[in-house]
Amino acid sequence: MTRSQTIVTDPVGDCIPARQRTAIRRKLLRWYDRHKRDLPWRRKNRSQDPYAQWVAEIMLQQTRADTVIPYYERFLSRFPDAMSLARGRQETVLKHWEGLGYYRRAILLHKACQQLRTENTPVPRLAEKLKTLPGIGDYTSAAIASISSDEPIAAVDGNVARVIARLFCVELDVLSSKGKKRITKLADQLIPKARPGDFNQAWMDLGSKVCTPRSPSCDICPLEKECLARATGSTDTLPIRGTAIKKKIPVVHCVVGVLSHHQNFLVRRRPIGGLWGGLWEFPNIEIAPKKEKTQAMKALVESIMIEPNEVVSLSTIRHQLTHRLMMFHVFAGQVANKEGKDIGDAYRWVTRAQFAKRSVSTAHRKIYQAAC
Ligand code: SF4
């Protein structure tokens, strides 16, 4: 088999031979130069700006590049640098993040920029310093530092781990600490001193376009000849992931009240921290799955001291999150007189136009569409 001449069997625990490292770097970078995706954060004016890379990396967490692009452009034109973001109101920042989900990312990004402003410091360029900011971990700091400042440090995310596990036939659970350690050790050996940012991005592109989770396109892969999984026919069984028992996703039930007074709706702002922190929503309360929904709705209405003429059940809205499935049982009611009621500081009556301008989670936008 001609491939065996270039494959080093089980490099784990040892150094990857210099010749093999050189071949992988050369082939991957050559492939990247030909096939790299044209993404706004890769353009010349932004590729060396650590803030522009930071925003991109935070938006790309849990979100596909195609989805991120319009949000990224809009966010950077409103907040072109860390200082403008630090000066922005949280409400405005969340409004520009609306629809992208995982709002805690935006809150931490904003907080980190405010920290830099207080310390009168520019956005750090090295991974060690970046990691001291809220919301930045090992992967994100390595990606920002290598891309914007050429720091030779490997950025290992799920895509990269998959490619490396196949390339070197790592037969460990890539989600276990032992598996992560081994993948990182291999990635660290491969990162070149020249063009480390391009090399990290090349891994990412290869993982998302060629070495995909199912049915990798080995025939067009630049690393086909170096790949142990390809040589041993184990591309379908690698990487090994999540040997730990998979948890069942919990289903959370909530009753939601869309309470209106003439053309106004009652909304409230969620406390900062936790799910959808800082966003606006219709009053709602979590309930036990088997609890009688109308009674629960009545208790919710009484807790905010509003007296609607009647509340009627409208529909149930299903909203899938990564770690839970939300079931919103939506009720609607007309409030005859809102004067003199204590609805608390977090609550506001808003018109449709005002509602449209507020930062609201996708789940509550769906509720609005169903009820209003
Ligand atoms: S040859 Fe196939 S399995 Fe190996 S790295 Fe390339 S795409 Fe992935």
Image: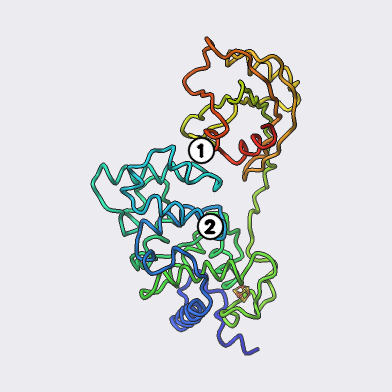
Checking the image for residue 342, the label placed there is none
Kindly indicate the quadrant of the structure image that contains residue 312: top right
Q: Identify the image quadrant of the N terminus.
A: bottom right
Q: Earlier in the sequence, mark 1 or mark 2?
A: 2
Query: 6 or 134: which is nearer to us?
Result: 134
The residue drawn where x is 49% and y is 23% is: 346
Q: Name the residue under label 1.
A: 357
Furthest residue toward bottom: 2
Q: Mark 2 points at which residue?
A: 178
Is 215 on the left or on the right of 355, as rendered?
right
The residue type indicated by label 1 comes to: Lys
Q: Estimate how packed mark 2 is, as few (under 14), some (14 to 19) or many (20 or more) residues with alpha carbons within 10 Å.
A: few
The residue drawn where x is 57% and y is 78% is: 9
Percent across and percent down for residue 64 are: 57, 58
Query: 367 or 243: which is nearer to us?
Result: 367
Q: Mark 1 falls on what kind of element?
A: helix
Q: Distance of mark 1 from mark 2, alpha carbons?
A: 48 Å
The residue type indicated by label 2 comes to: Lys
Query: 98 or 354: which is nearer to us?
Result: 354
The residue drawn where x is 48% and y is 63% is: 184
Q: Mark 2 falls on what kind of element?
A: helix
| Looking at the image, residue 143 lies above or below residue 17 | above
Percent across and percent down for residue 80 are: 36, 54
Q: Is mark 1 within 8 Å of ligand 1?
A: no
The residue drawn where x is 40% and y is 55% is: 54
Query: 365 or 213: which is nearer to us?
Result: 365
